Amino acid sequence: MNSAKMNIAQLNSAHVNKEPVNSNRIFVSLDTTAISKGSNKVATQISCLLNEQAKTEQTKISATLVRNGSRGMFWLEPLVEIETPLGRVAYGPVTKTDVAEIIKPEAFNGITDHPLCLGLTEELPWMKKQQRLTFARVGLIDPIDVDSYISHQGFDGLKNALTLTPQEIVNQVKDSGLRGRGGAAFPTGIKWQTVLDTPDQQKYIVCNADEGDSGTFADRMLMEGDPLVLIEGMIIAGIAVGATQGYIYLRSEYPQAHKILNQAIIQAKAAGYLGKNICGSQHTFELEVRLGAGAYICGEETSLLESLEGKRGLVRAKPPLPAIEGLFGQPTVVNNVISLASVPIILSRGSEYYRDFGIGRSRGTLPIQLAGNVARAGLLELAFGISLKELLEDYAGGCKTKKPIRSVQVGGPLGAYLPASQWDTALDYEAFSQMGAVLGHGGIVVFDDSVDMAAQARFAMEFCVEESCGKCTPCRIGSVRGVEVIDKIIEAKADSDQKAQSLTLLHDLCDTMEFGSLCAMGGMTPFPVRSAIKYFPQDFGLSSTEKTSDKSADKQSANEECDQ
């Protein structure tokens, strides 16, 4: 094994009390966000510098440039990491003009006094407090290097799975408490059990990588930084339910992920982890990447399947469930990227290990994405249970504009807008559901006090107008009428009677959409609308004491009283 493929512990041990010679490594991210901020230019400058050094008679620096995934600290990109006897030392944000001053012999011996030197990467506050399970290798390895993946416990879960029966694998996933990370939070093991129990000659594993929620990028970051863990998870799923073919339905706006996934599939197949006789077993699993149709609705699993079959992305009526009649009418597991990528650590460390993270029925960890008006945007992985307030204060660093935070939207464009009074709520599926919100894919978008919440409510309806597949009337027509009614409320100004009539109509319309729509597209559009009116009435020209009946809210309150 050459030095570039040694694991971190071996490399650090080899460097102690020795002059770095050929095993120095410099890491620059190839993540889409890092590239957008100039990481390719920085990497090119480093390559040129290393090539020039190699041509000199007395070589000062001998090093290897590794393009890794992002560490998730996007405000510090382009981030450059230099491996030293102490560990990796981070520099950022780096420009191409900084390279010559950073890449010097002394930088490979430890922490320097360069103004961009941040210290040991793993000791930075953002990294130190995390509980990285699914994202454990992201930012550490070359994403398509199978040997590097294996040296960091890659394919350990698959090797364990090959010693188990399909039912034993499914039991492990059920016992772990893993729930769908795409937003629906349905127990992953239950879905697998249904496919396993459904007899058929052909079954499929479909990965939903059509990540379209605002403020979310966890799927992309993982596919670009550690695609092999997704591939491993899909192989395990195939073995568990008896599927021999898998498809990754990838968002068309992710060209970098597309390229990396295809390269990783080629490398995995060459190493014997895909195709026939996986790892010398009798199991077969083939995998392809298919580009999405560019529509938000194709993130809904049945619409995705329609698109994958070459049809227009329209939502299917359920039943039958995709687990029974899915792709091409066959039993199909449809899981999100993070759901599938969480499986290898469950099979590697055991269901109890994974279940020990989290609270209540929300087990394991969640990749949390901080976006919008924040000083420190990025991704961190933590166990369920941390509060929004902790995330905003300890990680996001407040608003980039230095203004007070007014509202936070969690769970994408169809998630509720949460005021400060609700920021103590723990990130937990049930806790969010109880207050009429959704945790979704873990995306958190922050707004400062300059935001117009009436405009945000209107945007929710307008978004549904643009992205609805048009199959059902409540969603197709209701969203159009929703925009019109919100405009009337805003324009009514001092006419309180007209406002009251319009608000009553809007609440009735939200009821129709929530309970009559075929899928969550129309069913969840009322969430941001209702929350904006409830918590920010002044933006609609309403006084804080002005009330208009929200029937669904009244019903919910009545039900809660009965339950108590």
Image: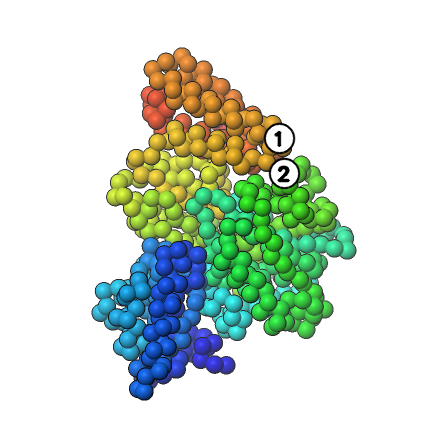
CB atoms of marks 1 and 2 within 8 Å: yes
The crowding category of the residue bearing disc 2, from other C-alpha atoms within 10 Å (few below 14, some 14 to 19, many at least 20), is: many
Q: Where residue 398 appears, x then y in whole percent?
A: 30, 46
- Identified by mark 1, the residue type is Cys
Identify whether 562 is placed above or below 186: above
Disc 1: which residue: 472
At horizontal 28% and vertical 65% (from top left) the residue drawn is 97
Q: Is residue 105 left or right of residue 320?
A: left
- For residue 225, the mark is none
> Which is more toward the observer, 166 or 33?
33
Identify whether 474 is placed above or below 152: above
Q: Where residue 42 appears, x then y in whole percent?
A: 35, 65
Q: Is residue 487 visible?
A: yes
Whole-number angstrom distance, CA of label 1 to CA of label 2: 9 Å
**Total marks in image:** 2
Disc 2: which residue: 315
Most extreme residue toward the bottom, as rendered? Answer: 57
Q: Where residue 533 appears, x then y in whole percent?
A: 40, 27
